[in-house]
Image (cartoon, helix red, strand yellow):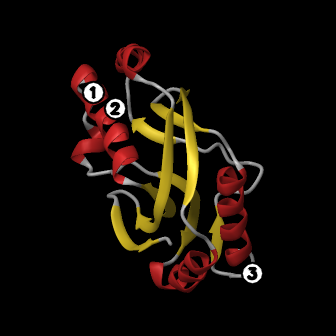
């Protein structure tokens, strides 16, 4: 499994990392920190034999898109284990999703995860993962106190392997 994710400007990244750190401290669940998962917004989850199959399309996507703004407005849960920050699905994010789907549509050895296809995608930035019920409650409590809406900027995209997280290639957007 591979992910294509959006990464953020320093200000946005620092705020999101602060939320991740606060959740880890409050819950004792440091999955995101231990696994060195940076703040990111996954745009596509893709099944492929290897990253070499994905790299030409990934580079093609990076030539078609630019930096863009997002507004992170809420905190939500993917029950039972994940707490996330939610951006508004704006035109910029919808175009990123559509661009990736279009680039990989005719690559036979590639399969886009159905939950990351255009119009089937819930944009989210994972803040805590593999949380128990008690940890989830503590994480929600800390976010109730700390979370505020945030204007952010997507400044790069990355192709990464999962389990463990490993960047294959990151491209700065213009």
Q: Position of residue 72 (x, y in %)?
A: 54, 37
Q: How many marks?
A: 3
Q: Nearer the viewer, mark 3 or mark 2?
A: 2
Residue at image point 55% right, 76% down: 62
Q: Which residue is mark 1?
A: 22
**Regarding mark 1 in the picture, which secondary structure is present there?**
helix
Closest to the observer, 19 or 50: 19
> How packed is label 3: few (under 14 Cα within 10 Å), some, or many (20 or more)?
few
Q: Which residue is mark 2?
A: 19
Residue at image point 69% right, 77% down: 103
**In screen coordinates, is 21 left or right of 170?**
left
Residue 16: quadrant of the picture: top left
Res 1 visible:
no
Closest to the observer, 155 or 96: 155
Task: Determine contact: label 2, label 1, CB under 8 Å.
Answer: yes
**In screen coordinates, is 135 left or right of 117?**
left
Q: Position of residue 3 (x, y in %)?
A: 50, 62
Closest to the observer, 58 or 131: 58
Q: Is residue 113 above or below residue 82?
A: below
Q: Which residue is mark 3?
A: 106
Residue at image point 54% right, 27% down: 76
Q: CA distance from mark 1 to mark 3?
A: 43 Å
């Amino acid at each position: 499994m591979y992910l294509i994710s959006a990464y953020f400007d320093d200000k946005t990244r620092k705020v999101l990392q602060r939320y991740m750190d606060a959740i880890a401290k409050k819950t004792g669940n440091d999955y995101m920190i231990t696994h060195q998962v940076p703040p990111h917004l996954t745009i596509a989850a893709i099944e492929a034999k290897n990253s070499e199959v994905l790299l030409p399309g990934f580079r093609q996507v990076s030539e078609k898109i630019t930096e863009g703004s997002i507004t992170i407005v809420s905190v939500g849960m993917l029950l039972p284990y994940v707490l996330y920050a939610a951006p508004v699905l704006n035109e910029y994010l919808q175009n990123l999703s559509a661009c990736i789907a279009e680039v990989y549509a005719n690559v036979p050895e590639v399969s886009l995860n159905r939950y990351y296809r255009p119009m089937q995608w819930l944009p989210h930035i994972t803040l805590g993962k593999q949380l128990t019920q008690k940890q989830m409650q503590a994480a929600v409590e800390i976010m109730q106190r700390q979370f505020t809406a945030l204007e952010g900027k997507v400044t790069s995209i990355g192709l990464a392997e999962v389990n463990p997280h490993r960047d294959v290639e990151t491209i700065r957007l213009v």
